[in-house]
């Protein structure tokens, strides 16, 4: 009985030490955020234009093969935001995401082929990638198809088709598509001429959408002022009212 009591005592002491060690480990070990939360942190930093924080949060996820993170790293390298501008790195990340069917990556890679940015220029490859992404409702690709349809590059020239693609992307908030659609309404090309609608889209295109380069917004602002020279004060007021009522969708 004495031996059993001593054994029980040793066992209880061992259990207490083990519990203490476990408690200390749980106290000092850093918590590992869930991947979904880490991704949301990175995307939130991107939406807030905090490029260094976005790159820091998204890089390990991209390296782990998360397609959305791969695509965003491609954007950061393509534009030199939070990282040095590097088209080779942008292409590498986009291609990894494209292999997983990520539509934004397909759209941006198509854009690089469209203008020959870091790759040999190819209207055919640009149109192929744009169509893949457009089938999934991607506004970047829809905008690209709009301009290619307008210019007859990689597809037949068709202003009506261009207007349809621009409209799809404009309603999702893409400023370049808004600019293209406004131009068509101003000229009456592919759509009935309508200065009020053109003015609406020019106004909205002049606002930074976080996607396009500054020259898009600057061109839209200049076009708004030029168009106003052809409009009455009441028509300008109507266009401004319509623009104010338009709701920009949330960024992805």
Image (tube, rainbow, N blue to C red):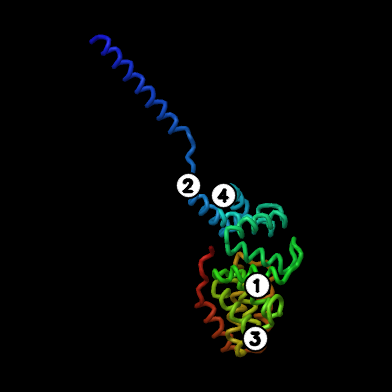
Q: Residues within 10 Å of mark 3 (few under 14, many from 20)?
A: many
- Marks 1 and 3 sit apart, C-alpha to C-alpha, by 20 Å
**For this rendering, which residue is in front, 171 or 130?**
130
Nearer the N terminus, badge 1 or badge 3? 1
Say whether marks 2 and 4 touch (CB < 8 Å).
no
* First in sequence: mark 3 vs mark 4: 4
184 up-or-down from 56: above or below: below
10 Å crowding of disc 1: few (<14), some (14-19), many (20+): many
Q: Which mark is nearer the camera, 1 or 3?
A: 1
Nearer the viewer's eye, disc 3 or disc 4? 4
Locate residue 41, reporting x and y percent.
Answer: 52, 52
Residue 188 lies, with reference to residue 250, above or below; the image says below
Q: Which residue is mark 2?
A: 34
Name the secondary structure under disc 1: helix
Between the C-alphas of marks 4 and 1, the distance is 28 Å
On the image, the x and y values in percent for residue 242 come to 52, 81
| Residue 217: quadrant of the picture | bottom right
Image check: 121 left or right of 205? right
How far across and down, in percent of the image, does residue 90 sit? 68, 57
Mark positioned earlier in the residue sequence (2 or 4)? 2
Q: Residue furthest left?
A: 1
Q: Position of residue 52 (x, y in %)?
A: 62, 51
Sequence-wise, the earlier of marks 4 and 1 is 4
Disc number placed over residue 144 in the picture, else none: 1
Distance from the alpha carbon under mark 3 to that under mark 4: 45 Å
Residue 186: which numbered mark, if any? 3
Going by the image, does 40 lie left or right of 22? right
- Whichever of labels 3 and 2 marks the residue nearer the N terminus, that label is 2
* Label 3, label 2: how far apart the Cα atoms are: 50 Å
* Number of disc labels: 4
Q: Which residue is mark 4?
A: 61
For residue 201, the mark is: none
């Amino acid at each position: 009985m004495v031996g059993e009591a001593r054994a029980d005592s040793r066992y209880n002491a061992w259990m207490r030490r083990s519990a203490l060690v476990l408690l200390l480990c749980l106290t000092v070990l850093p918590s590992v955020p869930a991947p979904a939360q880490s991704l949301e942190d990175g995307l939130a930093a991107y939406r807030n234009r905090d490029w260094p924080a976005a790159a820091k949060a998204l890089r390990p996820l991209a390296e782990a093969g998360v397609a959305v993170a791969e695509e965003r790293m491609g954007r950061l390298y393509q534009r030199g935001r939070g990282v040095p501008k590097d088209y080779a790195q942008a292409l590498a990340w986009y291609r990894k995401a494209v292999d997983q069917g990520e539509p934004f990556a397909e759209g941006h890679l198509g854009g690089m082929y469209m203008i020959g940015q870091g790759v040999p220029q190819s209207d055919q490859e640009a149109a192929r990638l744009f169509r893949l992404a457009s089938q999934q409702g991607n506004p970047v690709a829809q905008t690209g198809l709009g301009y290619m349809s307008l210019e007859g590059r990689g597809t037949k020239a068709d202003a009506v088709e261009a207007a349809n693609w621009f409209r799809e992307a404009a309603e999702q908030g893409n400023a370049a598509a808004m600019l293209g659609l406004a131009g068509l309404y101003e000229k009456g090309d592919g759509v009935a001429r309508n200065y009020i609608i053109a003015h609406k889209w020019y106004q909205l295109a002049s606002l930074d959408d976080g996607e396009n380069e500054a020259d898009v917004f600057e061109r839209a602002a200049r076009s708004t002022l030029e168009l106003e020279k052809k409009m009455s004060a009441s028509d300008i007021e109507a266009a401004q009212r319509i623009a104010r009522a338009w709701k920009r969708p949330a960024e992805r």
